[in-house]
Amino acid sequence: MNTYKETRGILLMLYSEVELSEEKKLTFYNEYIYKIRKLAYSGNTDAQYDLAQHYEDIGFLGDPN
C-alpha cells in the first residue's frame, strides 16, 4: 500500500538527486502528484496539506500550477 511517507520520499529524492535529467525529474514529479492527490482524496491530512501547497505555489521546475 502507498503511504504518505513513501510518497513524500519521491519528492525528497527529486530535490536531492542532481544527476537526474529534467525529463526524468518531471516524470517522478508527476508520479508524486498522482500519488499525493490519491492520498489526499482518501482523507490523509498531511497529503491534503501538501497538495494544497502545490496548488498555491509555483510548481516543480518553475511551471505554474
Image (cartoon, grey):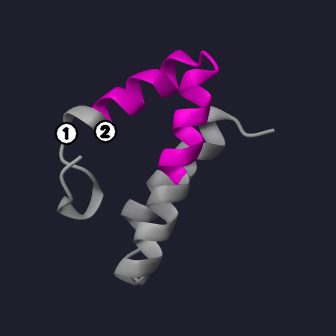
Q: Position of residue 25 (x, y in %)?
A: 42, 71
Give the class, few, some or many, for how many residues have Cα within 10 Å of label 1's Cα (few <14, many ≥20). few
Query: Callout 2, which amino acid?
Result: His
Q: Position of residue 58 (x, y in %)?
A: 18, 47
* Quarter of the image where one finds residue 22: bottom left
Seen in the picture, residue 44 relative to 18 is either above or below; the reply is above
Main SS, magenta region, reads helix
Residue stretch rendered in magenta on the structure: 32-53
Is 36 in the magenta?
A: yes
Q: Residue at x 41, y 68 (%)?
A: 26
Q: Residue at x 51, y 64 (%)?
A: 28
Seen in the picture, residue 39 relative to 18 is either above or below; the reply is above
* Quarter of the image where one finds residue 57: top left
Give the class, few, some or many, for how many residues have Cα within 10 Å of label 2's Cα (few <14, many ≥20). some
- The secondary element bearing badge 2 is classed as helix
Q: Is residue 54 left or right of residue 48?
A: left
Q: Residue at x 49, y 22 (%)?
A: 46
Is 61 in the magenta?
A: no
The image quadrant where one finds the N terminus is top right
Query: Callout 1, which amino acid?
Result: Asp
Residue that label 1 marks: 57
Q: Is residue 52 left or right of residue 2?
A: left
Q: Is mark 1 in CB contact (under 8 Å) with mark 2?
A: yes
* Quarter of the image where one finds residue 39: top right
Q: Is residue 17 left or right of residue 3?
A: left
Numbered tag placed on residue 54 in the rendering: 2
Seen in the picture, residue 23 relative to 33 is either above or below; the reply is below
Q: Position of residue 18 (x, y in %)?
A: 37, 77
